[in-house]
Every structure is written in structure tokens, then in C-alpha cells.
Image: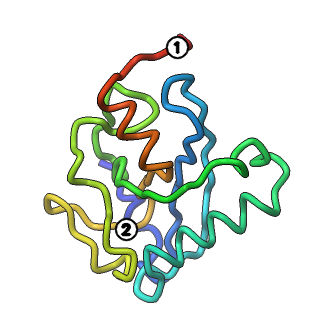
């Protein structure tokens, strides 16, 4: 079994952030962040880093109109992914509500934020609407 989750220390982790614009149309783009210090970076800091990348990189221009206000654990390195390719809809409690918490202190169902963790960043209202009516309009 590979150990890429241990390849980088928690003071220099690589995270994949799944930016989600639309659940129905599966509009998403991955943002790869390298060198993140999980011991000193809060959830709010991480969201602000993502928003800064969105405003400065032209490939994220379609995401500038979305209020990205919610973050959720998608999977860890070598963890199983869900059948939904956009977001993990099975575990609603994987939403991270405490934005002042350091990333290294987060534990959800025995999982920690570590190197090669994937997180989803999205609009909470759009997520709640999708959970109520999980219709995919683009296959």
C-alpha cells in the first residue's frame, strides 16, 4: 500500500480542494494547494487561500460568482471515494463547521486532515437544495 499521505509532513501538506459551482450540472474544478502548514492554518485561512486563488487565476473565473461558504471532507489519500463524483453526499456530518479550528486538529470519524486529503468547497444553500432533490441535469 502506498503511503503518499506520509510523504510530506503536516507542516507542508498538499491538499486537493474540489471547488463546486453546480451540483446539478456537475460543475467542478480541482484546486491543488501545496505547502500548506496544517498545524497553523485554520479552516477560515484555507477558505481564504482558495478564494485568493480563484480571484487571481483565470481558469477559476466561472467560480468567482459563487459564494463558497462551506467546506466538507471528501476523502483521504487511499480512502474510498463515493459514487457521486462531485461530493460525498453520504456523510453530512463531514461538513466542517468550526472555521477557527486548525486543520491538524480536525478529526471526523477517525480521519484527520493530512497530506493528500481532498476537501470540497461549495455554497451551503446549493448543497442543501441538492440533498433535498439530488437531480443530475448533465450526464
Circle 2 SS class: loop
Label placed on residue 114 = 2
Circle 1 SS class: loop
Q: Nearer the viewer, residue 119 or 66?
A: 66
* Quadrant position of residue 52: bottom right
Q: Residue drawn at (43%, 45%), measured in percent from left and top?
A: 125
Q: Residue drawn at (51%, 61%), measured in percent from left and top?
A: 15
Colour theme? rainbow
Residue at image mark 1: 137
Q: Is residue 44 above or below residue 96?
A: below
Q: Nearer the viewer, residue 22 or 28?
A: 22
Residue 56 point in image, percent of width and height = 82, 63
Residue 21 point in image, percent of width and height = 59, 39
Q: Is residue 128 above or below residue 49?
A: above
Residue 109 point in image, percent of width and height = 14, 58
* Quadrant position of residue 9: bottom left
Q: Earlier in the sequence, mark 1 or mark 2?
A: 2
Say left or right for 24 vs 65.
left
Amino acid at each position: 500500500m502506498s503511503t503518499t499521505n506520509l510523504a510530506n509532513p503536516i507542516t507542508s501538506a498538499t491538499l486537493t480542494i474540489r471547488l463546486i459551482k453546480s451540483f446539478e450540472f456537475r460543475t467542478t474544478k480541482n484546486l491543488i494547494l501545496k505547502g500548506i502548514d496544517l498545524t497553523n492554518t485554520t479552516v477560515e485561512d484555507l477558505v481564504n487561500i482558495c478564494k485568493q486563488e480563484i480571484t487571481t487565476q483565470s481558469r477559476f473565473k466561472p467560480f468567482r460568482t459563487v459564494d463558497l461558504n462551506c467546506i466538507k471532507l471528501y476523502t483521504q489519500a487511499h480512502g474510498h471515494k463515493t459514487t457521486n463524483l462531485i461530493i460525498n453526499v453520504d456523510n453530512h456530518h463531514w461538513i466542517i463547521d468550526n472555521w477557527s479550528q486548525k486543520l491538524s486538529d480536525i478529526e471526523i470519524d477517525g480521519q484527520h486532515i493530512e497530506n493528500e486529503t481532498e476537501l470540497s468547497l461549495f455554497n451551503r444553500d446549493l448543497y442543501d437544495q441538492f440533498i433535498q432533490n439530488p437531480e443530475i441535469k448533465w450526464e
